């Protein structure tokens, strides 16, 4: 993308002499920002526009062209692209709208120009884009004019699928004195996506933090690779992914013809690969301010200096939401604070110095420095309620002086009227000390930093288990469904315990094969056409003896014949009935269309439907990941001897989750869902047993959808 960001020569197709027109604004940007390269215009009505030579077509422009900007109505875009292909222009920015975002007809037009670009190796930004802004080098391949930005250069790389949203993020960031390197808006993403831009920004030495607004995830695998690489390079990526609700997904389709993955799936990817997922533009700005400081806490021990007891309480309340603690201060730290803090003021944490800083300004810096040097403190939140009129900037300089002496993050909470505190906050942000105007933003910013640091510390776990390591071991049948005995054989071959059982073709076969089984038993119909066996009377339990087994066989065959007369019967599955005490759980894997396999677990039966108490992870997972999944369930105390109850075999459950993870990859691509329900967890040390299993084949699911 080097020539897109730093072109040596540019042509504007659809250049205009009319001030305010898109074709004129695009031209004037090169004058207003003193562009050093060659600029050409294309418009058959003029020979010169704004002092630049103008030609009837791209082909007639002399010399080589790095980038073509296309600003003509949609009906003329294809011809402009063909001219660029003939001229061997490699990079094109298409402002024009009216393509895939407008429905089938527009989508067809977009596909036509996409084919031309593919055939001639043309890289496109757009269509329906506001272009590219290179803040560092002051190059604006956009129709927004120079005055729309403050041009504060820095190390934040911004990519946005929406041009207007990208500019909003950039403007709000500049208001907080954040400096940007680039802003690239991808629009309809004809052949250059937000992910492609993120890959460039990962490699770019001038970019330290990446911000992204996305409506679609073009490739789940590419996003995962980007996340893993960003963690390795310690380059934070802050992402606002919209289109999470059903209504939002429909809006995204009408906006930029996007397909959006599920909200939960995206969050799982973000959590695993260290993407900082936010929900609003304001949260993007808060996160960028936090990461712009380039300091990370080693733990969750927080100290704070406040000028108001109430502020200290609010900070404590909000920190608790993110599992961060106001750490008890050691006697050594308290004694040092007492060197300047009056006896009537508390030197516990929060350190509340009230209004004494007005009479003794040195107290502020002394307290901050003391806490920054305290071994028991990992990070600081500093309250600064004073504005520009009453010394706020002087106290901000004290904070900055201390920040220069420590690698611990210092977060500043500025409170008061915006007119008074904004210059103080901007001064701090400009000098890379994150400053916020409310308690929620300040404490959440600290959580962004701590969460990211933890993921970086554990980044090796991302590749601990690789899908490539799991060779294809199982070949799924060509039938519409996989029967329960077939599923259980696959589970058994994957080291997942199943009940002892047999399949009998008739009553004589059953009696012979069950001779070695221990009663009580359970009997189930085996048929590719019957997945919900209980609904058709296809399950009988408990069976206590041979007589009841014969009765069960007769009952099942009669019920099935009555309810599903044309069903293909492959036999009766008879298994030893597993008796309690145990907990019923459910384990399932679903293949997300964008991000791949996702595993879930939770209590089975009515609990999963009523309480929706489930834990999920993106595959692959390790046993350590699996153990974390179980422990984050709200119902976990039931596994751990709640109210003197039984303690259940959680390690065995975690092992099954890891085994299912391996199985999902060993099955290849032909399935869409794997489920064990129930998977019973027995008492500690007694293991688990998969009582029922289901594998849904991908082709069958496709057929159901088409119907």
Image (cartoon, rainbow, N blue to C red):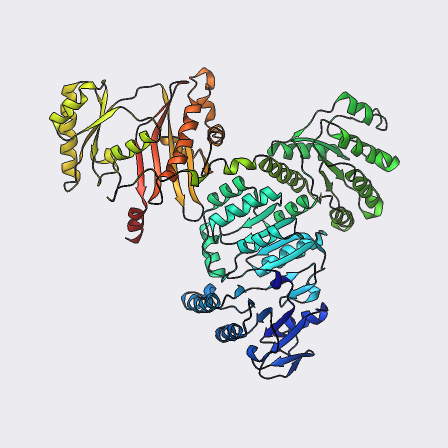
Please count the marks in the image.
Answer: 0
**Residue pictured at 58% horizontal, 76% vertical:** 14
76 relative position to 566: left or right: right
**Residue pictured at 47% horizontal, 36% vertical:** 465
Q: Position of residue 500 (x, y in %)?
A: 26, 23
Residue 127 is at least partly visible in this image: no
Q: In which quadrant of the rendered image does the N terminus lie? A: bottom right
492 relative position to 524: left or right: right
Residue 304 is at least partly visible in this image: yes
25 relative position to 382: left or right: left
Above or below residue 274? Residue 631 is above
Find the residue positioned furthest to the right.
359
Q: Which of the 4 image quarters holds residue 394?
A: top right
Find the residue positioned furthest to the top.
644
- Front residue of 705/274: it is 274
401 relative position to 572: left or right: right
Q: Position of residue 533 (x, y in %)?
A: 24, 34
Q: Position of residue 596 (x, y in %)?
A: 42, 44
- Front residue of 247/46: it is 46
Find the residue positioned furthest to the left.
508
Above or below residue 267? Residue 162 is below
**Residue pictured at 42% horizontal, 20% vertical:** 648
Q: Which of the 4 image quarters holds residue 551?
A: top left
Q: Which of the 4 image quarters holds residue 72?
A: bottom right
**Residue pictured at 67% horizontal, 57% vertical:** 171
- Front residue of 598/64: it is 64
Above or below residue 303? Residue 141 is below
Q: Position of residue 586 (x, y in %)?
A: 37, 32
């Amino acid at each position: 993308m080097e020539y897109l960001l730093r072109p040596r020569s540019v042509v504007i197709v659809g250049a205009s002499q009319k001030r305010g027109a898109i074709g004129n604004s695009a031209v004037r940007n090169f004058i207003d920002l003193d562009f050093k390269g060659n600029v050409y215009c294309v418009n058959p009505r003029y020979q010169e526009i704004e002092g630049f030579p103008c030609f009837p077509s791209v082909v007639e422009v002399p010399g080589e062209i790095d980038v073509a900007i296309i600003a003509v109505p949609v009906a003329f875009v294809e011809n402009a692209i063909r001219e660029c292909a003939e001229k061997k222009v490699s990079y094109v920015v298409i402002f024009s709208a009216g393509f895939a975002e407008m429905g089938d007809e527009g989508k067809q037009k977009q596909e036509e120009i996409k084919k031309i670009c593919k055939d001639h190796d043309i890289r496109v930004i757009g269509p329906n884009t506001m272009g590219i802004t290179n803040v560092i080098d002051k190059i604006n391949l956009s129709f927004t004019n120079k005055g729309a930005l403050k041009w504060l250069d820095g190390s934040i790389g911004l990519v946005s699928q929406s041009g207007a949203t990208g500019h909003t993020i950039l403007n709000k960031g500049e208001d907080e004195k954040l400096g940007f390197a680039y802003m690239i808006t991808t629009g309809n993403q004809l052949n250059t996506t937000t992910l492609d831009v993120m890959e460039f920004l990962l490699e770019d030495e001038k970019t330290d933090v990446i911000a992204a607004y996305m409506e679609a995830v073009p490739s789940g695998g590419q996003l995962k690779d980007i996340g893993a690489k960003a963690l390795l390079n310690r380059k934070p990526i802050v992402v606002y992914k919209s289109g999470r609700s059903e209504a939002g997904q429909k809006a995204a389709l009408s906006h930029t013809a996007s397909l959006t993955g599920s909200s939960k799936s995206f969050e799982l990817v973000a959590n695993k690969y260290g993407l900082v997922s936010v929900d609003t533009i304001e949260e993007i700005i808060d996160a960028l301010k936090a990461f712009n400081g380039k300091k990370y806490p080693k733990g969750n021990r927080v100290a704070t200096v406040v000028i108001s007891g109430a502020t200290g309480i609010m900070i404590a309340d909000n920190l608790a939401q993110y599992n961060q603690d106001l750490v008890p201060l050691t006697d050594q730290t308290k004694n040092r604070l007492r060197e300047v803090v009056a006896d009537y003021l508390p030197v516990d944490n929060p350190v509340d110095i009230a209004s004494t800083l007005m009479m003794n300004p040195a107290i502020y810096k002394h307290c901050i420095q003391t806490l920054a040097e305290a071994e028991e403190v990992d990070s600081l939140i500093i309250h600064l309620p004073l504005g520009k009129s009453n010394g706020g900037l002087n106290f901000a300089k004290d904070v900055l002086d201390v920040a220069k002496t420590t690698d611990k993050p210092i977060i500043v909470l500025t409170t008061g009227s915006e007119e008074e505190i904004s210059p103080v906050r901007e001064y701090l942000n400009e000098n890379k000390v994150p400053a916020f105007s409310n308690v929620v933003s300040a404490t959440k910013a600290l959580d962004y930093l701590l969460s990211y640091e933890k993921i970086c510390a554990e980044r090796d776990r991302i590749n601990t288990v690789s899908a490539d390591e799991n060779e294809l071991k199982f070949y799924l049948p060509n039938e519409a469904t996989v029967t329960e005995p077939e599923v259980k054989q696959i589970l058994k071959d994957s080291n997942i315990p199943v009940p002892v059982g047999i399949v009998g073709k008739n009553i004589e076969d059953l009696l012979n094969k069950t001779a070695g089984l221990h009663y009580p038993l359970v009997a189930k119909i085996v048929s590719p056409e019957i997945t919900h066996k209980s609904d058709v009377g296809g399950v009988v339990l408990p069976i206590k003896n041979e007589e009841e087994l014969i009765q069960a066989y007769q009952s099942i065959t009669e019920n099935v014949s009555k309810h599903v007369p044309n069903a293909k019967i492959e036999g009766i599955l008879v298994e030893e009935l597993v008796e309690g005490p145990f907990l019923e759980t459910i384990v399932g894997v679903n293949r997300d269309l964008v991000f791949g396999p996702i595993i879930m677990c939770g209590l089975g039966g009515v609990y999963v439907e009523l309480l929706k108490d489930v834990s999920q992870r993106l595959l692959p997972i390790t046993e350590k990941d699996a153990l974390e999944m179980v422990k984050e369930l709200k119902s976990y105390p039931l596994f751990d001897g709640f109210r003197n109850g039984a303690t259940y075999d959680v390690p065995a459950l975690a092992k099954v989750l890891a085994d299912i993870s391996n199985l999902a990859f060993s099955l290849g691509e032909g399935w869409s869902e794997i489920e064990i329900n129930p998977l019973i967890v027995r008492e500690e040390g007694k293991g688990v047993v998969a009582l029922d299993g289901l594998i849904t084949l991908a082709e069958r699911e496709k057929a159901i959808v088409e119907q």
